[in-house]
Amino acid sequence: MTKPNTIIDCGCGASYERREVQLPIKDIGCFDCSDCGARLEIWSSRTVPAFKRVDAVDAAAKRA
Ligand SMILES: [Zn+2]
C-alpha cells in the first residue's frame, strides 16, 4: 500500500517531502527542521515518516 507523498512546510520557509515507511519493528524518533531546528514530527510506531529536503522557490529566494 502506497500513500502519496506530502509536502511539509516549516515556519521558517523550508520545505520537506514526507513519505511513510513501514518498518519491521517499532521505531521512536523525531524530525527537526535542519534550518531552524523546529520539531516537525515525533513518531513511535512501525510506520515512520521519511523526510527529504525540497528546494522550493521560496527557499531559493531566502535571505540569510
Ligand atoms: Zn524551519
Image (cartoon, grey):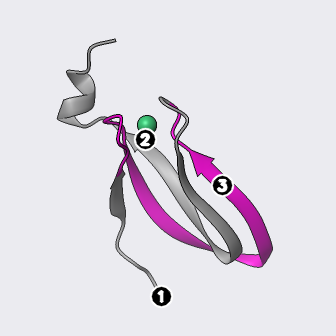
> Magenta segment, principal secondary structure?
strand
**Left or right position of 59 against 23:** left
The label number, if any, that marks residue 30 in the structure image: 3
The image quarter containing residue 29 is bottom right
Query: Which structural element holds mark 1?
Result: loop
Which quadrant would the C terminus be assigned to in this image?
A: top left
Badge 3 or badge 2: first in the primary sequence: 3
Does any atom of ligand 1 lie closer than 8 Å to the CB of label 3?
Answer: no
Residue sitting at 51 percent across and 40 percent down?
A: 33
Image x and y of residue 24, in percent: 77, 79
Q: Please name the residue that numbered disc 1 is placed on.
A: 1
Badge 1 or badge 3: first in the primary sequence: 1
Image x and y of residue 15, in percent: 35, 43
Query: Which structural element holds mark 3?
Result: strand
Q: Amino acid at mark 3?
A: Cys
Residue sitting at 60 percent across and 50 percent down?
A: 31
Q: Please name the residue that numbered disc 2 is placed on.
A: 53
**Left or right position of 51 against 48:** left
Q: Is residue 25 above or below residue 27?
A: below
The image quarter containing residue 56 is top left
Image x and y of residue 5, in percent: 36, 66
Q: CA distance from mark 1 to mark 3?
A: 23 Å
Q: CA distance from mark 1 to mark 2?
A: 24 Å
Q: Which range is magenta?
A: 9-34
Q: Is residue 27 above or below residue 29?
A: below
Q: Amino acid at mark 2?
A: Arg
Badge 1 or badge 2: first in the primary sequence: 1
